[in-house]
Image (tube, grey):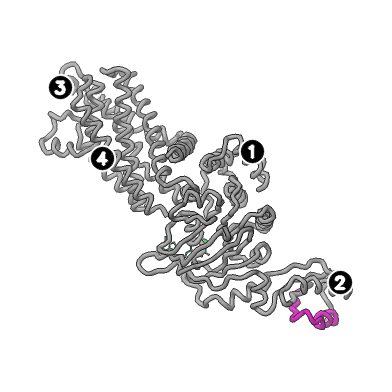
Amino acid sequence: MEYAIRTENLSKTYGKTFKALDSVSLQVSRGEVVGYVGPNGAGKTTTIKILTGLIRPTSGRAHVNDRDVVSNPRDALRSMGALIEVPGVYDYLTPHEMLTYFGRVYGMRRDVIDQRIKETLELVRLPDWEHKKTGAFSTGMLRRLAIAKAVLHRPDILILDEPVLGLDPKGIMEVREMIRQFRSEGMTVFLSSHLLSEVAEVCDSVIFLDKGKVVTSDSVEGIGRRVGHAVVDARFLHPLSPEEIGKLKDIDLIKGVDMKNSTARLQYDGTPETSAQILRLLVSLNLDVVSYAAEGVGLEEYYVSVMSDEKGVN
Amino acid sequence: MMWALSDTWQVVLRDVRSRIRMPVFIFMNLFQPVLWLLLFTQIFKSLSGSVAGEGISYLDFFAPGVIVMTVLFGSAFAGMSTLMDMDSGVLSKMVATPVNRVSIITGRVLANVLVGLVQALIVFVVAAIMGVRVATGMPGVLLVLLLVALLGTGFAAFSNGLALLFKRTETVMATTNLLTMPLMFMSSMMMPSQALPDWLNTVRQFNPVDYAVVGVRNLVLYGYVWTDLWKSLLVLGAFAVVMVVFGTLMFGTRAE
Ligand SMILES: Nc1ncnc2c1ncn2[C@@H]1O[C@H](COP(=O)(O)OP(=O)(O)OP(=O)(O)O)[C@@H](O)[C@H]1O
Ligand SMILES: [Mg+2]
């Protein structure tokens, strides 16, 4: 039981020749939060559909909890919760009715289901909507309901396809909080996303996929080191004066400064230690730091540098 | 094996519940058969006595056909809801669980049949109010339900298979429309076999709808005609099994 998710040379061909996935081998360790990143049409959803038993690979293997998802889907899917792009609810059913079905098919007892429905709806902030028809739900509410569905049976692996797609900033923050909470509970999370800042914020490591092939797989910090630097955004109470900017540039640990209004994007080597030290130095320079957040950790630059130029027809 | 049954049952429950939430559809499906029952029996009233023998009104003769028609209409379009669920992602959510695909498809088909049986019973009641009596009584009614359940299973599974094969609402709609009408007319649903041309009597031997019509009509009008009844049960049973296999195969390979 070394890896929660493991694929070996996974390939999926559509039509005669189009390879949506081309020999993808990836590993996700237990308890890890992994971002699955790539341009439109890279094959992220295809991978997730294979992992969740929706489609079969043309060749290769996929294991979830060491169970082969093709030959043993029942066991493989049991300990996994999934959120797949589309909403997929009947608008005339209530969350309670919908979740009851899923609880039953995961073999949960009725009283356990009722209790878990309460808990999960609480978790996704829909406690008052248990018996309301989902037809009136907003995109954000439907997404949160889908997340409640995914964790209802207490899976130890969670697979999320674009969990924040189409959500407003508040919705994005809420989902991010949930993912953090799942991680703190020891859950393994595999999520695909286009939002690199999102991935940098919540993920331990990243797998870059392009044209059906894995380009890189590394920890978020490791990617920062590959780019040679990572970035952190420091926002100040007032725009900095030229001398103040000069002082920033004089700090050895800071490799580059990029000012925009009152925010400075600082490049550094990507280690948490350096980041902490920089913050201490900023404060000691008597600069009023309003916020200090790792932004993208160089992911964007890395992304641009490794992804092929033509982004496909999608 | 127990879990497969319990999974199927959960799918049935879920499907029936979602159908009950849309009672409009259940009644919309009933509208046509009931209309036929009311209208045709008026139009062909003058044929009473001459069509199916002494003392048998056209209503008596036609009511069994309408019961079969109700289940046929209700099941022949079953694949449409599967396509809708595919488009909306409801189906993906169901497939991405430990429930196996066979349970999902059979559960959906069974739910469809259950609703069809309720509709058939409603038509039965309407016919009874109009004066139709069942020669074989309560046991006969149960056998009628068994016959139409087999027919409904076959067509619901066939429609699901078709839906997964074509994956386009328009195509499935057109194919189904193209099939159901001829299947009804190329049977003894509206006219007794004696009144049909020879070629039609040959063709109807290959038409599952006709086996249901003959079986149901015997039970309602005449009593237990065992040779016909066995033949109907056998043919419809085989039809149901073959179609469930077809639907399951399609679902296993093409529900992506
Ligand atoms: N059923 C299908 N038939 C044919 N081609 C398909 C099918 N499903 C996906 N594809 C193709 O496979 C490729 C990978 O698609 P996939 O949905 O996995 O990409 P993705 O990485 O999820 O992209 P996005 O970021 O846009 O969601 C795309 O080029 C897509 O057009
Ligand atoms: Mg996708």
3 or 2: mark nearer the eye: 2
Q: Amino acid at mark 3?
A: Ser
Q: Is there a contact, CB below 8 Å, between mark 1 and mark 3?
A: no
Q: Are marks 1 and 2 on the same chain?
A: yes
x, y percentage for residue A287?
Answer: 86, 73
Task: Give the answer, above or below, for where B135 lies relative to A284.
Answer: above
Q: Name the residue carrying label 3.
A: B50
x, y percentage for residue A195?
Answer: 62, 65
Q: Name the residue carrying label 4.
A: B181
Find the distance from the CA under tag 2 to the CA under tag 4: 82 Å
Say which element carries label 2.
Answer: helix
Q: Is there a contact, CB below 8 Å, between mark 1 and mark 2?
A: no
Q: Chain of mark 2?
A: A
Q: Chain of mark 4?
A: B
Q: Which image quadrant for residue B184? A: top left
Q: Name the residue carrying label 2.
A: A283
Say which element carries label 4.
Answer: helix
Can residue B22 be spotted in the picture?
no
Q: Which image quadrant for residue B143? A: top left
Find the distance from the CA under tag 1 to the CA under tag 2: 48 Å
Q: Amino acid at mark 4?
A: Met
Name the residue located 89 percent from the left edge and 73 percent from the top edge. A286
Q: Name the residue carrying label 1.
A: A115
Of the image marks 1 and 2, the number of the one nearer the N terminus: 1
Q: Which stretch is magenta?
A: A243-260
